[in-house]
């Protein structure tokens, strides 16, 4: 489904975000990426849909290189990937429905989407996406009238309306309280199970990572240092992922 082949990312200032990452993620997995702040979690996630350009290696999605994709092909590949952000990334003054419909922009001409001329089929799709995350009754509310958890559900619905088969979520619950956190992660899990949606989530909390992940990937200094199930991850594993002293800084550093 998603394949990283010797992927490295060096930022223009010389910081190495990723170092020779090799990974294969299968359809329907619920992958949680854990690691210290600065370990490279966002860099890894954002390289999948090319919000971040990698500097070495290649990423394949369903056997096709997104790294080499251009123009229409890139647009079509990106359509397949929904993205969920910590701050929801909604148009605050637009209705919930319009926000969800924005997941359809990749399917229509710019003029049509600017004018808001959405086909009935798209509106039905958006409404059913809202239904799946249990907030259909909020369709005509302004996005900024919703609670944080509800707004995050709108962004999940947007990814569903996009008919994505991959969801990338970068710290989707970092701004939410503990109860809402569980609700949003439960929603992501339900969508993963019911639709077979391949899901990759960056999380700070080890407990939540263990609770939801079918596969845990630990990264440190841009390198994959653990890859396995939650059961396989011992306390030692987490010590290794989170041991601050041995996190490399910049291009190369000694182990403390
Ligand atoms: N645009 C950028 N330019 C230069 N360096 C960057 C840039 N973005 C990230 N980095 C660096 O790349 C490394 C990995 O950053 P990344 O944002 O992927 O970490 P993270 O694991 O997502 O951290 P956090 O948990 O704080 O979100 C860090 O050393 C960071 O400082
Ligand atoms: Mg990050």
Image (tube, rainbow, N blue to C red):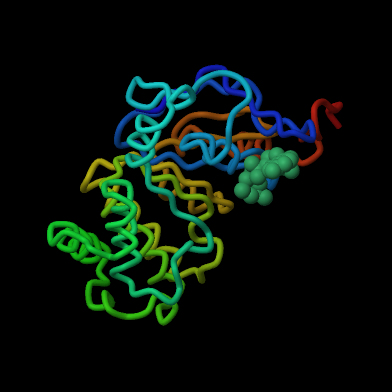
Quick check: 23 above or below 138? above
Total numbered labels: 0
Task: Give the quarter of the figure containing the N terminus.
Answer: top left
Q: Residue at x 23, y 63 (%)?
A: 117
What percent of the width, then of the height, locates residue 139? 26, 74
Q: Residue at x 34, y 61 (%)?
A: 114
- Eyeballing the image, is 26 above or below 211? above
Query: Which of the pair 34/237 is nearer the observer?
Result: 34
Between residue 67 and residue 9, name the one nearer to us: 67
Residue 73 % position (x, y): 35, 29
Q: Tell me the residue at 29%/61% (across/down).
A: 101
Whether residue 210 sits left or right of residue 125 in the image: it is right
In percent of the image, x 13 and y 57: which residue is there? 121
For residue 48, above or below residue 7 = below
Residue 243 visible, this angle: no
198 left or right of 255 in image: left
Give residue 161's quadrant in the image.
bottom left
- State the residue in front, 101 or 180: 101
Residue 183 rendering spot, x and y as whole percentages: 37, 65
Quadrant location of residue 234? top right
Q: Residue 198, how many percent across, how many down? A: 34, 39
Q: Quadrant of the C terminus?
A: top right
* Residue found farthest to the front: 111
Can I make out residue 96 in this image? yes
Residue 201 appears left or right of 160: right
Above-or-below relation of 126 to 150: above
């Amino acid at each position: 489904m998603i394949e990283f082949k010797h992927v490295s990312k060096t930022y223009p200032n010389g910081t190495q975000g990723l170092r020779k990452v090799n990974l294969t993620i299968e359809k329907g997995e619920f992958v949680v990426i854990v690691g210290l702040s600065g370990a490279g979690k966002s860099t890894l996630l954002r390289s999948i849909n090319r919000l971040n350009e990698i500097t070495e290696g290649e990423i394949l999605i369903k056997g096709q290189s997104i790294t080499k994709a251009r123009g229409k092909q890139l647009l079509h590949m990106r359509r397949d990937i929904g993205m969920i952000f910590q701050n929801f990334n909604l148009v605050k003054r637009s209705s919930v429905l319009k926000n969800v419909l924005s997941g359809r922009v990749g399917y229509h001409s710019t003029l049509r989407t600017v004018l808001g001329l959405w086909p009935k089929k798209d509106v039905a799709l958006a409404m059913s996406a809202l239904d799946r995350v249990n907030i259909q009754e909020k369709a005509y509310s302004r996005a900024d009238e919703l609670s944080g958890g509800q707004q995050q559900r709108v962004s999940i619905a947007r990814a569903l309306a996009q008919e994505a088969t991959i969801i990338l979520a970068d710290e989707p619950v970092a701004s939410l309280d503990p109860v809402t956190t569980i609700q949003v992660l439960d929603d992501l899990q339900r969508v993963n199970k019911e639709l077979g949606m391949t899901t990759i989530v960056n999380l700070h909390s080890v407990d939540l990572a263990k609770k939801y992940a079918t596969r845990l990937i630990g990264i440190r200094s841009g390198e994959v240092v653990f890859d396995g199930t939650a059961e396989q991850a011992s306390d030692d594993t987490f010590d290794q992922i989170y041991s601050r002293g041995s996190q490399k800084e910049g291009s190369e550093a000694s182990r403390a």
